[in-house]
Image: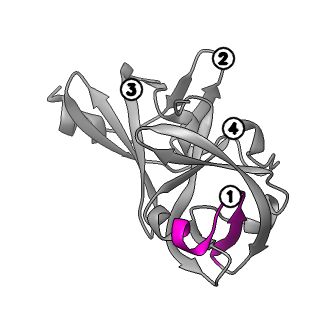
Amino acid sequence: MNRNNFFYFGKIYKTFGLKGQLLIKADADDLKLYKNVAHFFLMIDGGLVPFLVMELTIRQDSVLVLLEGMNADRAVKFTGIEVYLPDSDMPKREDVKYYFHEIVGYTIEDTKLGIIGIVKGVLEHTHQEVLEIDHNGIEILLPLVDEFIEDIDKKKKILYVNAPEGLLDLYLNR
């Protein structure tokens, strides 16, 4: 199974207890939204492998989980493994227009300059998120703030922006 239609949930950072429970450091805002997850998908040897959830406890910033077939000896080998969930398990939230993982691969189109490039990723800094955009091999960094986002077309995979005057010129030498 490849990563298409899955999102990164977190990483197993240690084992817990004698039953083989795993602690997952989750990359999510509201973990309570994931309390009914039935399967976790672990990145093993470059592919996603499904594991049935037998027990799940939400903690402050992590999830304590017992997966089917896991015991204390086997669990140790899973430390450091990335954990994914299907996009269908992504909580639906009214206050969110898009999730960061969704816009990777989107085309960025500026209202003044036209097509700028493709979103490579979103850098999550303490004070503000930043779009990483690839423009023909040149990396462009654009703050991801509501004032710069004009619209999003999920069907065409285009993020329309209105970048501040001169910011893109710094990268594009125009």
Pick the front one: 8 or 131? 8
Pick the front one: 172 or 28? 28
Question: Pointer 3: what residue?
Answer: 118
Q: CA distance from mark 2 to mark 1?
A: 40 Å
Q: Secondary structure at mark 1?
A: loop
Asked if marks 3 and 1 touch (Cβ < 8 Å), the reply is no
Q: Earlier in the sequence, mark 4 or mark 2?
A: 4
Pick the front one: 32 or 29? 32
Q: Amino acid at mark 2?
A: Lys
Marks 2, 1: nearer the viewer: 1
Question: Pointer 2: what residue?
Answer: 155
> Which quadrant of the rendered structure holds the N terminus?
top right
| Residue at left offset 63%, top offset 69% | 71
Pointer 4 local density, CA inside 10 Å: few below 14, some 14–19, many at least 20: some
> With respect to residue 41, does 127 lie above or below?
below
141 left or right, relative to 124? left
Q: Secondary structure at mark 3?
A: strand
Q: Earlier in the sequence, mark 3 or mark 2?
A: 3
Q: Secondary structure at mark 2?
A: loop
Q: CA distance from mark 4 to mark 2?
A: 16 Å
| Residue at left offset 72%, top offset 48% | 96
Q: Amino acid at mark 3?
A: Ile
Q: Amino acid at mark 4?
A: Asp
Question: Pointer 1: what residue?
Answer: 69
Q: Secondary structure at mark 4?
A: helix
Q: Which numbered dot is residue 87?
A: 4
Segment tinted magenta in the rendering = 61-75
Q: CA distance from mark 4 to mark 3?
A: 21 Å
99 left or right, relative to 35? left
How far across and how far down the image is residue 38, in percent? 80, 51
